[in-house]
């Protein structure tokens, strides 16, 4: 693993913690209970995809939450800068995590196959 990859992984790990803390500090109570499942920092550290657990929200609620997160993104970035002491914070792109849902479907398929045998 390259040194730059290690640096990005560290940055992603710290961002995951800081963003979770920032959600609790926001005035919008809908955002307090959000769970950050993963953060993917892109090369150069200018952008980061933040994946949120969507298992408890309807599609309408998901849409509202994404809009609220988009409005709160500058506040979350400034919180991360203050807490980390970094020179810059990547631009955050919020997305709902589809991976958890896919894992559930795969597990269901495996259990069906097991039951058929």
Image: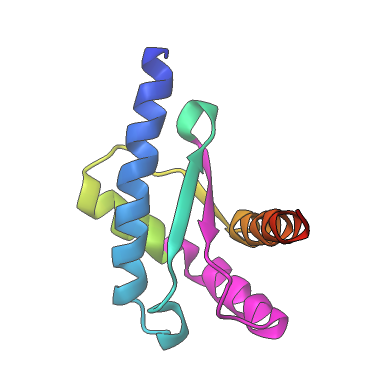
Q: Residue furthest right?
A: 116
* 73 in the magenta segment: yes
Q: Magenta part of the protein: which range? A: 46-74
> Which residue shows up at 60% across the image and 81% down it?
57
Please determine whether, in this image, residue 42 is positioned above or below residue 24: above
Please determine whether, in this image, residue 49 is positioned above or below residue 95: above
* In the image: residue 110, left or right of residue 53: right
Q: Nearer the viewer, residue 34 or 102?
A: 102
> Which residue shows up at 51% across the image and 48% down it?
91
Question: Which corner quadrant of the image does residue 96 belong to?
Answer: bottom right
Please determine whether, in this image, residue 16 is positioned above or below residue 66: above
* 95 in the magenta segment: no
Is the N terminus in the top left, top right, bottom left or bottom right quadrant? top left
Please determine whether, in this image, residue 35 is positioned above or below residue 91: below
Q: Nearer the viewer, residue 23 or 106?
A: 106
Task: Please count the marks in the image.
Answer: 0
Q: Nearer the viewer, residue 106 or 53?
A: 106
**Residue 112 image offset from top left, x and y in percent:** 74, 61
Question: Which corner quadrant of the image does residue 88 belong to?
Answer: top left
* In the image: residue 113, left or right of residue 10: right
Res 88 visible: no
> Which residue shows up at 39% across the image and 56% down it?
77
Res 64 visible: yes
């Amino acid at each position: 693993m390259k040194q730059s990859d290690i640096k990005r992984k560290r940055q992603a790990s710290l961002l995951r913690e800081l963003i979770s803390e920032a959600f609790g500090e926001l005035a919008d109570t809908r955002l307090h209970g959000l769970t950050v499942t993963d953060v993917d920092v892109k090369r150069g550290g200018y952008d980061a995809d933040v994946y949120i657990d969507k298992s408890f929200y309807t599609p309408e609620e998901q849409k509202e939450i994404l809009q609220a997160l988009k409005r709160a993104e500058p506040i979350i970035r400034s919180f991360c800068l203050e807490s980390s002491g970094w020179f810059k914070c990547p631009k955050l792109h919020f997305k709902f995590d589809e991976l958890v849902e896919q894992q559930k479907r795969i597990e269901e398929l495996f259990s069906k196959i097991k039951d058929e045998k």
